[in-house]
């Protein structure tokens, strides 16, 4: 008497295959540097903005304040632990006379921000208050700190996600600053 052939039941392998696929996707994702996320804003105009200034002597800060010079727009907050990590680099850069330092105080209490700057140093030429994330949303900010390099024509040339380090400055931002200067000559 002949025995009926057994059919293979592939449905038992489905969970294993799904797990293997998910593990592969996670493994690939974990090898990528999250600071290298592309920004849709690169090579676009800085969004138009007009925000209150943090310091009493400055009434407003707007995109018109960025025109005609190279600017670093740094998103920070007194609540941001990673902002302390990059702050010494910002203070160092503030001594350069070829870059305007603009702070975007994001979702912060004004008095806490002023105390924080008094404690760690104030590297900014101008500081805008973005309590409601109006500009941060338009820039695609995902968290603080983030820094944008703006050319004299108002075009966003680079976006640094995370703390601005010596390495990020020398490898990524400074070459673009030098290229902008060369374009002007």
Image (cartoon, rainbow, N blue to C red):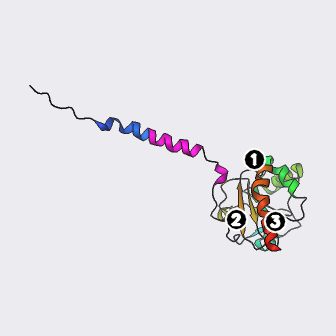
Q: Nearer the viewer, mark 1 or mark 2?
A: 1
Image coords of residue 174 (percent x, y): 80, 59
- Disc 1 from disc 2: Cα separation: 20 Å
- Disc 1 from disc 3: Cα separation: 23 Å
Q: Which residue position holds label 3?
A: 53
Question: In the depicted view, which residue is nearer to us: 15 or 112?
Answer: 15
Disc sitting over residue 136 in the figure: none
Question: In the depicted view, which residue is nearer to us: 109 or 33?
Answer: 33
Q: Is residue 160 visible?
A: yes
Looking at the image, residue 42 sits to the left or right of residue 128; the answer is left
Segment tinted magenta in the rendering: 20-45
Q: Nearer the viewer, mark 2 or mark 3?
A: 2
Question: In the depicted view, which residue is nearer to us: 125 or 149?
Answer: 149
Disc sitting over residue 135 in the figure: 2
Q: Nearer the viewer, mark 1 or mark 3?
A: 1
Magenta stretch: includes residue 28: yes
Q: In the image, what residue occupies the spot 42% across and 41% down?
A: 18
Q: Secondary structure at mark 1?
A: helix
Q: Secondary structure at mark 3?
A: loop
Q: Which residue position holds label 1?
A: 82
Q: Is residue 20 above or below residue 65?
A: above
Question: In the depicted view, which residue is nearer to us: 160 or 31?
Answer: 31
């Amino acid at each position: 008497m002949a025995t009926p052939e057994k059919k293979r039941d592939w449905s038992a392998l489905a969970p294993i295959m799904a797990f293997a696929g998910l593990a592969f996707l996670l493994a690939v994702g974990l090898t990528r540097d999250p600071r290298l996320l592309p920004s849709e804003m690169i090579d676009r105009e800085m969004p138009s903005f007009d925000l209150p200034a943090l310091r009493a002597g400055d009434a407003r800060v707007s995109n018109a304040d960025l025109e005609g010079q190279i600017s670093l727009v740094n998103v920070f907050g007194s609540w941001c632990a990673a902002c302390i990590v990059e702050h010494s680099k910002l203070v160092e850069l503030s001594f350069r006379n070829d870059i305007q330092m603009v702070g975007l105080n994001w979702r912060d209490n004004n008095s806490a921000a002023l105390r924080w700057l008094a404690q760690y140093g104030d590297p900014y030429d101008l500081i805008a208050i973005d309590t409601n994330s109006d500009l941060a949303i338009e820039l695609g900010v995902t968290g603080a700190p983030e820094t944008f390099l703006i050319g004299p024509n108002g075009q966003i040339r680079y976006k640094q996600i995370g703390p601005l380090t010596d390495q990020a400055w020398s490898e990524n931002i400074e070459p673009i600053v030098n290229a902008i200067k060369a374009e002007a000559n």
